Image: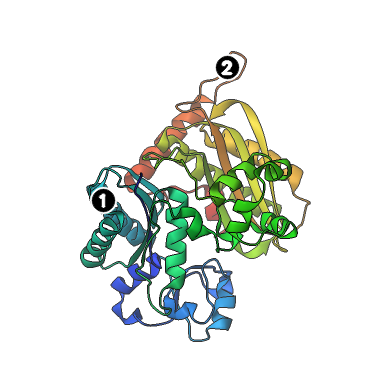
């Protein structure tokens, strides 16, 4: 029987900010952008949550809910540094660590002799004492149940303070634990799927477990079979120690809607340069170029094109992205967000086909020189002249 832990750092950004400024402890504050600049709540303290403030909420709404809300700018270098320290301690415990995000990870501790809950308590104590960071853990026989257990444990903890919870589901009790929970707690059940299930009389995970699997497959296909397995607490996925990059993308949200085509073109150019730099640093090249546009009414569209050969070069990415943009953007329409991405990775350098012209030699030499400068002095050391002319 496997022993899987799911670790989640409680209000991680806020916990780091409280170390940077102890005066914030016990206060209602949020990390994110300013409300007059379309800022979004990246994280919020537990006193702020008591007012209804939540992550991903527009900061303007957060301030309305909590008029005395303190707003802190994000310090991502500090967050990454603290996250690295946490992950080092997880690796000290077991080599089987799957980092999901900056503040979340799965651990497979099956080979350790201790009970899973005891291992979780030992790990939590170390992170609390050595790093002064609160964290919650779920303990179960698989990833699915460990994650849900952690969510439920955090929800049931005393409000107004970090939960620092540990919730264990004993082996053999997976289905019983899941049975009374709302079906939305299950992975892969979003609002639309939940609405469809409600029409079938399915409101809890137990209802879903008792629903005929064949009927779920007829209605939802392969996803129906997966839901039936998960509803019974069955999840055979391993803790993956390495995560393969699926895509590289950059996007920006404007402080005010932009209607000017030249401004949007320059923004695409900058985003394409940043994506190209990341691809070259990671030794990746991709065949699919994608753009993302969000209008002022929050409607979002994506467009993509597949190239004949993989690329990691700024100009190739930009030209493909700009072509997609000109065909998707009604001239003069206000744009709230714009993004560029590359996927379909082949790995390694661009290798032109027999009839595909390689990138211009001058472009490649320029990219190499700029990359060297950015690696030595930072990504913002070099900027395009067209950007400077607008300042």
Q: Nearer the viewer, residue 266 or 127?
A: 127
Q: Nearer the viewer, residue 231 or 313?
A: 231
Q: Nearer the viewer, residue 235 or 352?
A: 235
The answer to whether 140 appears left or right of 206 in the picture is left
Residue 268: percent from the left, percent from the top?
Answer: 60, 47
SS assignment at label 1: helix
319 shown above or below 90? above
* Residue 250 seen in render: no
Do the residues bearing badges 2 and 1 touch, measured as CB atoms within 8 Å? no
Quarter that holds the C terminus: bottom right
When asked about the image quadrant of residue 223, the answer is top right
Residue 86: percent from the left, percent from the top?
Answer: 29, 56
Q: Which residue is mark 1?
A: 88
Whole-angstrom CA distance, mark 2 to mark 1, is 43 Å
Residue 43: percent from the left, percent from the top?
Answer: 46, 68
- Residue displayed at 77% across by 56% down: 332
- Residue displayed at 46% across by 70% down: 155
Quarter that holds the N terminus: top left
Q: Which residue is mark 2?
A: 353
């Amino acid at each position: 029987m496997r022993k899987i832990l799911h670790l989640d750092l409680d209000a991680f950004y806020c916990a780091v900010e409280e170390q940077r400024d102890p005066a914030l402890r016990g206060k209602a504050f949020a990390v994110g952008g300013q409300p007059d600049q379309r800022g979004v709540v990246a994280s919020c303290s537990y006193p702020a949550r008591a007012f209804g403030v939540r992550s991903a909420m527009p900061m303007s709404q957060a301030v309305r809910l909590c008029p005395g809300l303190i707003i802190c700018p994000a310090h991502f270098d500090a967050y990454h540094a603290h996250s690295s320290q946490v992950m080092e301690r997880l690796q000290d415990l077991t080599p089987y660590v799957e980092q999901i995000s900056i503040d979340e990870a799965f651990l497979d501790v099956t080979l350790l002799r201790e009970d899973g809950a005891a291992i979780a308590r030992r790990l939590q104590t170390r992170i609390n004492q050595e790093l002064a960071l609160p964290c919650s853990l779920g303990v179960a026989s698989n990833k699915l149940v460990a994650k849900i257990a952690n969510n439920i444990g955090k929800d049931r903890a005393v409000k107004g303070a970090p939960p620092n919870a540990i919730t264990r589901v004993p082996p053999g009790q997976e289905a019983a634990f899941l049975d009374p929970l709302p079906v939305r707690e299950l992975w892969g059940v979003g609002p639309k799927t939940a609405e469809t299930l409600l029409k079938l009389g399915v409101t809890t995970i137990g209802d879903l477990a008792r629903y005929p699997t064949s009927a779920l497959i007829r209605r939802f296909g392969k996803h129906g079979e997966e839901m039936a397995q998960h509803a019974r607490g069955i999840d055979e996925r391993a803790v993956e120690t390495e995560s393969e990059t699926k895509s590289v993308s950059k996007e920006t949200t404007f402080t005010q809607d932009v209607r000017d085509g030249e401004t949007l073109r320059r923004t695409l150019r900058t985003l394409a340069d940043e994506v190209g730099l990341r691809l070259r640093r990671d030794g990746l090249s991709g065949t699919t170029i994608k753009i993302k546009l969000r209008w002022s009414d929050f409607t979002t569209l994506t467009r993509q094109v597949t190239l004949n050969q993989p690329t990691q070069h700024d100009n190739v990415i930009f030209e493909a992205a700009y072509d997609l943009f000109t065909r998707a953007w009604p001239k003069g329409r206000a744009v709230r967000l714009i993004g560029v991405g590359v996927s379909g990775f082949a790995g390694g350098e661009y290798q032109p086909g027999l009839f595909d012209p390689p990138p211009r030699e001058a472009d490649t030499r320029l990219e190499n020189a700029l990359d060297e400068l950015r690696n030595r002095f930072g990504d913002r050391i070099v900027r395009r002249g067209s950007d400077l002319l607008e300042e």
